Image: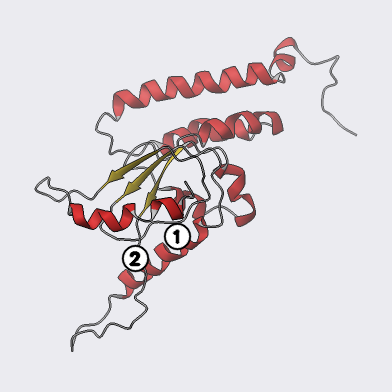
Amino acid sequence: MSCAPSSSTKSAVQRALGIADIVSMVVDLIYDDLQLLLSDHHRCGCCPIWPEKKRALAPLACVNRLWFAMAIPVLWRQPCQTKGDPCLGRLLWHIAPARRNLYAKHVKAGAVQTFRRKPTVPVRMPRGVRVDPEQERRRLEEEAIGTMLAGVDFPKLECLTIRDTAYNRIPQLGSQNVKLVLLKPHIEEDGTPGIRVKDIEPVLGQLPVRHRH
């Protein structure tokens, strides 16, 4: 026997919080207040903001289907807001494959990480020099994430940030609406970019094909 209150026994507040327009306003107000708070505490642009946004909005998505439908688009609108936040690949890597597009379809601004692809021709290492196992593990994971992103659609993605252009491969994204591309190269300790202008050209050359724009 169901214990859920009928529509006649629900309070005015319960009925109001079941109206889509009101729920949308509540979610937007929480998000706007959070943005103001985080902008005061993370002015450097390096500290991660995603954990705070997830902590504030993810519980709202667990209330019921209506709240999920209102909270998830706001949470995933701009998930990679600062340099300290994970890239799209890292965020989606830990989500079940069947649910990745459910979140990716809401992303309007995001970031991807360049990655290394194993050379097609074997490279002979100098005698006595061995491949670092941890470095190889990271390379394989980066390549797997790049392959994973090729199967994810981002129909609303308009602003794409490419981080750490020290490598010459960028993930292929299912997006046809990218209007703005930002390059955020690695910065050396002396403050200079860790990449030369001529090294950026191979990355830029992949954009028309890889992002279908």
Q: Quadrant of residue 51?
A: top left
In the displayed structure image, the side of residue 36 where residue 27 appears, left or right: right
Q: Amino acid at mark 1?
A: Gly
- Reading the image, the residue beneath label 2 is 116
Image point (64%, 54%), residue name: 98
Report the colour scheme: secondary structure
From the top left corner, tell me how far across and down residue 186 is, in percent: 23, 50
The image shows residue 77, relative to residue 27, as above or below, that is below
Of 82 and 60, the residue lying toward us: 82
Q: Amino acid at mark 2?
A: Arg
Image point (28%, 39%), residue name: 46
CA neighbours of label 1 inside 10 A, class few (<14), some (14 to 19), many (20+): many
Image point (56%, 48%), residue name: 153
In the displayed structure image, the side of residue 181 where residue 194 appears, left or right: left
Q: Earlier along the polypeptide chain: callout 2 or callout 1?
A: 2
From the top left corner, tell me how far across and down residue 110 is, in percent: 43, 41
Q: Residue furthest bottom?
A: 127
Q: Quadrant of residue 141?
A: bottom left
Does residue 207 show up? yes
Of 53 and 9, the residue lying toward us: 53
- Reading the image, the residue beneath label 1 is 146
From the top left corner, tell me how far across and down residue 166 is, in percent: 25, 57
Q: Assign a secondary structure to mark 2.
A: loop
